[in-house]
Amino acid sequence: MQSHPFRADGPPTGGTIGKGARVQRTFLRSISYELMGLLIFVAIFHLLSAIGAALDETGLLLVSLVMAVVPALLWLAVFYRMDRAEPEPKQLVLGVYLTGLLLMAALYQPLFGVLFAMEGWLRVYWWSHLLGGVLVTGMASMAIVYAAVRIVAFNNPEFDERLDGVIYAVAAGLGVATVHNFVYVVRYGGVDLDVGSIRIVVNALGYAGVAGMLGYFIGQARFEKTSVFYLPAGVVLSAALLGLYFFLIEQTASTGLRAEFWRHLLLGLFLTLLIMGAVSWLVRRANEETARVAQLAATGDRWEPKPVEIASDRGE
């Protein structure tokens, strides 16, 4: 049986631990640059919003479709250029992204349009919006993220760090977000370049950020002995976070449409930073614990409970 760097049958070496720290720094820089890039993306289309009024329906639709894929392409470009010396399996990242995109594209209409017919009931009540976002949109989307990572990368030997699970899951989440953005654009025959750019970024932040949480569970399951319920619990938790994310976004509505969408963007950025910060902390803590256990195993030290002194019956 192949020894994994973080399993009990294959303690990590010093080089592997050092690689993990470099990968984590690279990932955090990538997320930071992605968020800055998305803000620049929104700012640019905010400044060019007047151009949208001059476009005909076809031109607006084409521009909007290009906008729909920009967040995913931006993240992939940032990730590809970060730390060129780091031998990360970049082809796997692209493969997971495309798999997530294709799975969601194939299942979107059968699931949301036919089986659950969500347009007829999702936004009727606040509780239907929340439950539908968790039990239907959230569960389906996160199941697709898990399936994409499982099919393309989970058993690949290049998947050698816990954080790789987060990276692959974020890529799959962006694939899912791309389809949702396409549907949003096509449904409205093109979107306002100002408001539409914000909505597209908010969607990308939600799916990518919550997918990162699921990626933590995937990384743990790859390198630790977990129960049969561990990964399903990760999917359920991520689905609940996704449903709650979009429910909170919708609850930020204000009197003006543009003010509402800018508030959406600020809340989306805050929630994404909160989720990814939690994921980064969890991964770092798990790696530190694994390194500590591996060091004890390598030195032959074992933890033994101290004997408990029991008073004798002699009254000593």
Image (spheres, grey):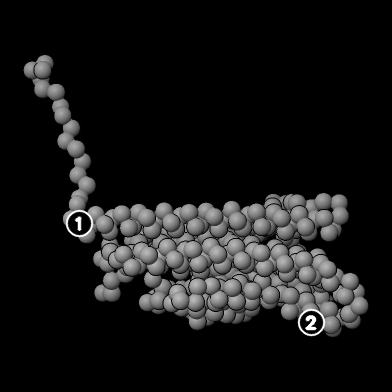
Residue at image point 87% right, 75% down: 51
Does 169 sit left or right of 4 as displayed?
Answer: right
Does 115 sit left or right of 259 as displayed?
Answer: left
Residue at image point 41% right, 65% down: 20
Q: Secondary structure at mark 1?
A: helix
Whether residue 246 is visible: yes
Quadrant assignment for the N terminus? bottom left
State the image coordinates of residue 268 (x, y, percent, origin top left).
68, 57
Residue 140 higher or lower than 288, as above or below: below
Residue at image point 81% right, 67% down: 46
Residue toward you, 298 or 305: 298
State the image coordinates of residue 116 (x, y, percent, origin top left).
67, 67
The dot on residue 62 is: 2
Find the distance from the CA under tag 1 to the CA under tag 2: 62 Å
Does 223 sit left or right of 38 as displayed?
Answer: left
Whether residue 115 is visible: no
Residue toward you, 218 or 122: 218
Q: Looking at the image, how many numbered discs can be counted on the residues?
A: 2
State the image coordinates of residue 138 (x, y, percent, origin top left).
60, 62
Quadrant assignment for the C terminus? top left
Residue toward you, 314 or 23: 23
- Label 2: few (<14), some or many (≥20) within 10 Å? some
Q: Are marks 1 and 2 in contact (CB under 8 Å)?
A: no
Residue 293, by quadrant, is bottom left
The dot on residue 49 is: none
- Label 1: few (<14), some or many (≥20) within 10 Å? few
Circle 1 residue: 299
Residue at image point 50% right, 67% down: 26
Q: Residue furthest right?
A: 54
| Amino acid at the residue labelled 1 | Thr
Pointer 1 or 2: first along the chain: 2
